[in-house]
Image (spheres, rainbow, N blue to C red):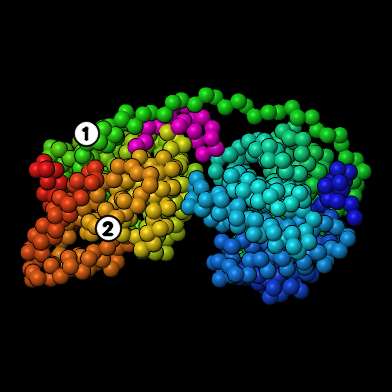
Amino acid sequence: MTSFREYLQNHIVLFDGAMGTLIYQRGIFIDKCYDALNLTDPDLIRKIHQEYLDAGADVIETNTFGANQFKLTRHNLRDQTIEINRVGAEIAREVVQKDGYVAGSIGPLGIKIEPWGEISKKDARKAFKEQAQALLEGGVDLFSVETFQNIQEIEQAIIAVQYLCDLPIIAHMAIQDDGKTSYGTHLKEVVHYLTDLKVDGIGLNCALGPKRMLDFLETIVGCTNLPINIMPNAGQPQYVDGRMFYVTTPEYFGVYAKRLIETGARMIGGCCGTTPNHIQKMANSLAQKQTRIGKPVKITDTIEKTESLPEPVPMPQKSTLASKISDGRFVTMIEMVPPRGNTLSKQLEQASKLKKQGIDAINIPDGPRASARMNGSAMAVLIERVVGIETVLHYTCRDRNLLGMQSDLLGLSVLGIHNILAITGDPPMMGDYPEATAVFDIDSIGLTNLLNRLNHGMDLGKKAIGNSTQFLIGVGVDPNALNMKRELERFQWKVDAGAEYAITQPVFHVEALEIFLEKVTKSIPVIAGIWPLQSLRNAEFMKNEVPGVTIPDTILEKLSRFESKEDQQKAGLEIAIQMAEKVRSFTQGFQVSAPFGRYQIALDVASITEKT
């Protein structure tokens, strides 16, 4: 049989349509692992493949789009990764025989990779390699890496396949309606990037319907000499009585198949919502065009040369706080939680007092413990403008998508907020509104990368933004983490991503902090978190219900000696001062909390810097 690479040179190729749509239509709900059906209901998968082959598809994709170790782990199927992929390929091979080609389907890992997440590129390649090896053993003819949003992630998938074999690779990206990926990479940049990776074809799939896909094809057809594959959705889904329906008709797909071919697509197919009926109509259109493959497209468009980027602002020039930390001077911060209402008079009054007492900055949490409070950004702007003391604004990943974060941060830069603490954020389930949804496009490591990129004059898509931002990038660290190895790895990744200093969780165990810092190989200045306990009940709550806080039993025992809350509060202050005195010699500052708005207690702890 002619190899796929040779077949593609002389034919317009028709891929199949959606797999998940048909599985769902046949009564398998979306809480199930569709990839595992290769083992539990192979007849269903075999039947769907056969229907697409009968409809006229040249290429049948394996039912393995989500069959990587990370996605399968969510279904407790990690140990079946190899079998699910191998059998998935064998089922498709059995159906196709020599009447077409089998494409090994590989989708995103479902977890962010560096620089936006905690999975390294090396680990990503390893996962893709495991999947690709099993697909090879099952007998695929080519690979379809598809529906990727992150060009760096799809690159790891391509490298993994290329390491294992020389089979053709068609690399598909999912582009949003604005012509960019969700990471802000422009369509033309995507095409040039994939072309340089030496794949056999470039594709756009999912996300959009035929009309918008045709618009994008017109944009990129002159940007590469590689064959282009267009696989649209059947329009936008509609939610009816608890089920999703796609309403774009097969006839409409047949019309657009002609237009896609005439515009220059060398491969076509369908994605979400498409069925064998859609593919059959496309096959009819393809039959009319099959003998009229045009000459190779002349590449007339190139990426605009990226304008020169400005030099990053040196750390000492970013803010007064940055200057002190950079010079090795000791700094003191006091935490101020935003109010639950819309009045800041008390906070502004307290901020003025803290400034007069020589506090370097006010640390503003962002919805701590997923609580519904005033936006910390608004509070930071008003404190800096009205009082004239710098703030350290916690910025969390919980509530904003990746593009929203970039917009926020650019706005904060214009408003003069330069000290940012990158925080992943507490999940809504532990807060005021547990039914609320979280975003978590990235975590604190990815956010640190984003801040660092903006500091270098680039946006998410590595496009110049004009002037560089001048964010002092802080990160959190938990020296009491149960999984110390993991916490150390994450800390090192934050440093690599551009973190310039760190603030610890509240310290109640000095030796643990010392041990942690001794194990750190790439150090940045560390500021110790200090929490003056207010009572035995407060200590018990912190120990048992606040993630990242470890309170030794000896402290609970000491507080339990006192009956009145007043005496317990005095003991808590004494413990906090002792902690501050002990960590003073090997940290570069304190971040003192003011429980229940008791700022004088925080000042009493912070004042030890004047005595040492």
Q: Who's the residue at 44% across and 57% down the image?
A: 438
Query: Secondary structure beneath disc 2?
Result: helix
Q: Who's the residue at 60% across and 55% down the image?
A: 126
State the residue position of label 2. 512
Mark 2 or mark 1: which is in front? 2
The three-letter code of the residue at mark 1 reads Gly
Q: Is residue 176 left or right of residue 367?
A: right
Does 362 lie within the magenta span?
no
Instruction: State the residue in front, 499 or 387.
Output: 499
Q: Magenta: predominant secondary structure element?
A: loop
Q: Is residue 396 left or right of residue 546?
A: right
The three-letter code of the residue at mark 2 reads Ala
How far, Cα to Cα, is label 2 from label 1? 36 Å
Q: Quadrant of the N terminus?
A: bottom right
Q: Is residue 5 left or right of residue 212?
A: right
Q: Who's the residue at 24% across and 49% down the image?
A: 528
> What range of the chain is rendered magenta?
456-472
Residue 517 visible in the picture? yes
